[in-house]
Image (spheres, grey):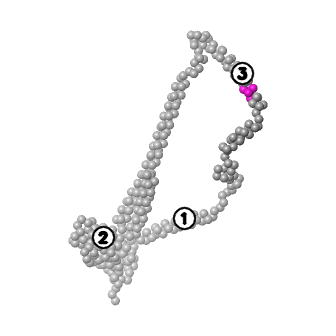
Amino acid sequence: MKYISYLFGGLCTVAAAVYLVIYLYRWEWQRAVICGVLLLAVEGFLVLVIMLGRMSRLERRIMDADTRVEEIKRRLEHSREDQSVNAFRWLGSDPRRDGLDGTTRTFVFVPMLMVTGAALSGLAWVIQRVAAVTARPGAERRLAGRLAPLAAPSGGVHGPLPQLEDRPAVPRARPWRTLAAVAGSVAAVALIIFGVYALSDATETREEARPDAAASTVVFQIQVHGGNTDSARELAAEDLWQSCRRSTAAANPTASLSRLSTGVYAGVIRPALSSHDMLRLRGCISDAMANRATATVLGDGQAARSH
């Protein structure tokens, strides 16, 4: 489940980032803001999943440590109870029967212990000498033969292992790997720089030279949700056109809007707009800034001058 969450969050992050760049390039600001908020939400989700995973692991470690402490405590208590039992009670003193504060029992036990130890040591020496005299090399060979099937192969399970002296002290130089890493790093940096430059160039609010045309034309279709009547479409189209015509960098004092068919309108701006301003105008219309209105750009173009 954790890896599924990581996969889902990673795909959502990549998709939100890609569409954020696309909408910024198209000058569709409302959609770009939505993608940016979604990107932040997904990143917060991933951070929360990681933090919950870390906290659960810490909780398990604390529980294991508490369990271990309780187990050690029980063992200590059990060993303390075992120590309370006198296993050598017969050596204890009994003032009612023994004299001299009950220490007379040890007068007999210590000599008996010493004599028994000496006797056992002598018996062990005799057994060792007899075994040394009667042992034969054939017994060792038979034991080695019986243990031979249990021995590992001479060359190891996976073949002979390289010895330490066979390995070079300094690893061999790999120039191709170094060159590939350097080339990849340079390509990544160049790609990032190019992407930032292209995005900044597409979103820069600068005034460009106007083309050699009489006017610029944009044809779009509009729909109003919750009341798609002619009057509602007319009002939404006019509101959308008046707000979007002011989104260009160049001044356009002459901008007219005419109805072509049901829900289809054509906007004409004089003088003609540059390609950058046309991109901004299309993005503004597609972004549907009017209330409950959805606009779709059907086409745009430049009207040639009449000669």
Specify the amino acid type for callout 3. Answer: Ala
Q: Amino acid at mark 2?
A: Ala
Q: Is residue 246 left or right of residue 91?
A: left
SS at mark 1? helix
Q: Which residues are magenta?
A: 124-128
Residue at horizontal 41 percent and vertical 66 percent from the top: 21
* Displayed quadrant of residue 300: bottom left
Q: Is residue 127 magenta?
A: yes
Query: For this view, does 28 lie left or right of residue 152?
Result: left
Return the x and y of residue 140 as percentages of the image width and height: 73, 38
Mark 2, secondary structure of its residue: strand
Image quadrant occupied by the C terminus: bottom left
- The residue sitting at 59% across, 15% down in the picture is 93
Residue of label 2: 295
Q: Is residue 135 left or right of residue 89?
A: right
Marks 3 and 1, how far apart in space?
Answer: 83 Å
